[in-house]
Amino acid sequence: MTREDLIEQIRLKKSYLCVGLDTDPDKLPSHILKEEDPVFAFNKQIIDATKDFCVAYKPNIAFYEALGTAGWESLRKTLAYIPDTHFTIADAKRGDIGNTSAMYAQTFFNRYPFDAVTVAPYMGRDSIEPFLAYAGKWAIVLGLTSNPGAGDFEQLLLSNGMRLFEQVLQTVAGWGSTENLMFVAGATRPEGLRQVRAVIPEHFLLIPGVGAQGGSLEAVSEAALNDDIGILVNASRSILYASSGVDFADRAFEEAASMQKAMSAFIG
Amino acid sequence: MTREDLIEQIRLKKSYLCVGLDTDPDKLPSHILKEEDPVFAFNKQIIDATKDFCVAYKPNIAFYEALGTAGWESLRKTLAYIPDTHFTIADAKRGDIGNTSAMYAQTFFNRYPFDAVTVAPYMGRDSIEPFLAYAGKWAIVLGLTSNPGAGDFEQLLLSNGMRLFEQVLQTVAGWGSTENLMFVAGATRPEGLRQVRAVIPEHFLLIPGVGAQGGSLEAVSEAALNDDIGILVNASRSILYASSGVDFADRAFEEAASMQKAMSAFIG
């Protein structure tokens, strides 16, 4: 999906919500566990319930991989079920030497035809470039993440006065364009989002951390929106597990609708 | 496998060779492609040919994942075929927020019972700790890698005078012990290996980059060996693809034997 098409979807739906499909069999309602493929059955209902309120879906690959080949099959079916109007992100945090990153890109752009994959920057240019070689596909590179450990290395002060995450944003931005690169910037640090925007005003940001991790949608929106909207705000657990009962899809519907309503106020 | 057992195997075999199973269907000898599971058939012959000369095997997960569910099945069979005397490494470069890293640890320590998994450090402590919570299992954290992109971020100078990779080594070393943490240190920079050893003299290092990537076994050994040996030197393509013909296993045998012979000179 192109940047233009993504922005069009956001303006059409007045929503920049991304629903994270961190589907954990241990958290599924008991009636769903009776289905032949409980993970897909759950995702299908979540997608049906939320698709009018969101523009993107982000399966967390760790959750599928942990289930072995059955999990990869649930992932394949889930991806096929997501409407073409929605941007799809493989949250995989991959990154390795060039020939290996090329294999990962093949997995998440060809075998499983996602629009985007999340990528870790530590190993530098040749670990990221293979993900930028596909027309209409995106690398979403870790900038400043939402977890407590973000303080350990991402925030380190460099000798040039920049923080490591600022250097990563600036350097990686030079390897691609606003048409094939986004960055992860966590919602748990609104002041961090402003620092991110100072370095990359135009790129799309994927913002996790709203909801279960404690970030505020309003603070995030004020800090990170740009003229093209320019953000995807992800919520996973707060939508998927809004209820653990038979009404889980209805509650997911309500949660997603409520987030979309709050977002609509920020879209002119 | 414990550190003690690993060192015992190294001394017994006079080898610190790790064979990287970066098995690529596009590079397999044509006669192997007729097998029902060509990747496993190839790996089986490589393991038979090299097991007396190496102490570890390191499947590169990207290569299996790219083949879909069939690839994961080849991986499962390969892991089951590796003798218990050998240390097994899932080269996966995983790392995410705590609850997600815990899923990755479950995948590579339980579902696929590897001894170790490679981990990217960018996201900090909670992205690494879940891999340290399994008795007898190891996290192998990226320090200074062997690829050209290692210069982009890993070598950045911090305001405290350290390079980023040195800070990563020092900080991460504090989260575990020499019994559950190793570090990746690339062979293409022997001077880099000396810098690594200055920060972590006792930890085991996983050293890729000898062979196809151009690193020298002698230079690496001189720079990185410690009193407990303390290194695993990986070779992948130079062994797997020593021949593209029907004699591939014989040539892999010769390559592995030659590396073991060179290593034996460094083991008293």
Image: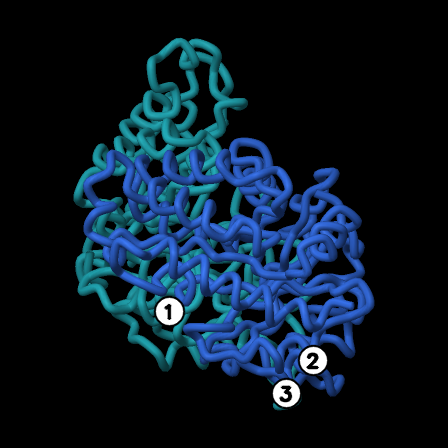
Chain colours: A cyan, B blue
Mark 3 lies on a secondary structure that is loop
At label 2, counting other C-alpha atoms closer than 10 Å, the crowd grade (few under 14, some 14-19, many 20 or more) is some
Q: Which mark is residue B223?
A: 2
Mark 2 touches mark 1? (CB < 8 Å): no
| Relative image position of residue A10 (x, y in whole percent) | 26, 53
What residue sits 66% from the left and 78% below the top?
Answer: B193
Examine the image and state in which quarter residue A11 appears: bottom left
| Relative image position of residue A203 (x, y in whole percent) | 35, 70
Q: Are marks 3 and 2 on the same chain?
A: no
Examine the image and state in which quarter residue A101 appears: bottom left
Whole-number angstrom distance, CA of label 3 to CA of label 1: 30 Å
The answer to whether residue B233 is left or right of residue A175 is right
What residue sits 67% from the left and 48% below the top?
Answer: B138
| Relative to A111, residue B151 above or below | below
Mark 2 lies on a secondary structure that is helix
The answer to whether residue B168 is left or right of residue A65 is right
Which label sits in the foreground, 2 or 1? 2
Q: Which mark is residue A98?
A: 1
Where the N terminus of chain B falls, by quadrant?
A: top right
Give the amino acid type for the residue marked by disc 2 in the picture.
Ala
The answer to whether residue A220 is left or right of residue A89 is right
Which label sits in the foreground, 3 or 1? 1
Q: Which mark is residue A161?
A: 3
Examine the image and state in which quarter residue B137 appears: top right
Mark 1 lies on a secondary structure that is helix
A1 or B31, which is in the foreground?
B31
Residue A88 in sight: yes
Q: Earlier in the sequence, mark 3 or mark 1?
A: 1
| Relative to B131, residue B164 above or below | below
What residue sits 49% from the left and 36% below the top?
Answer: B81
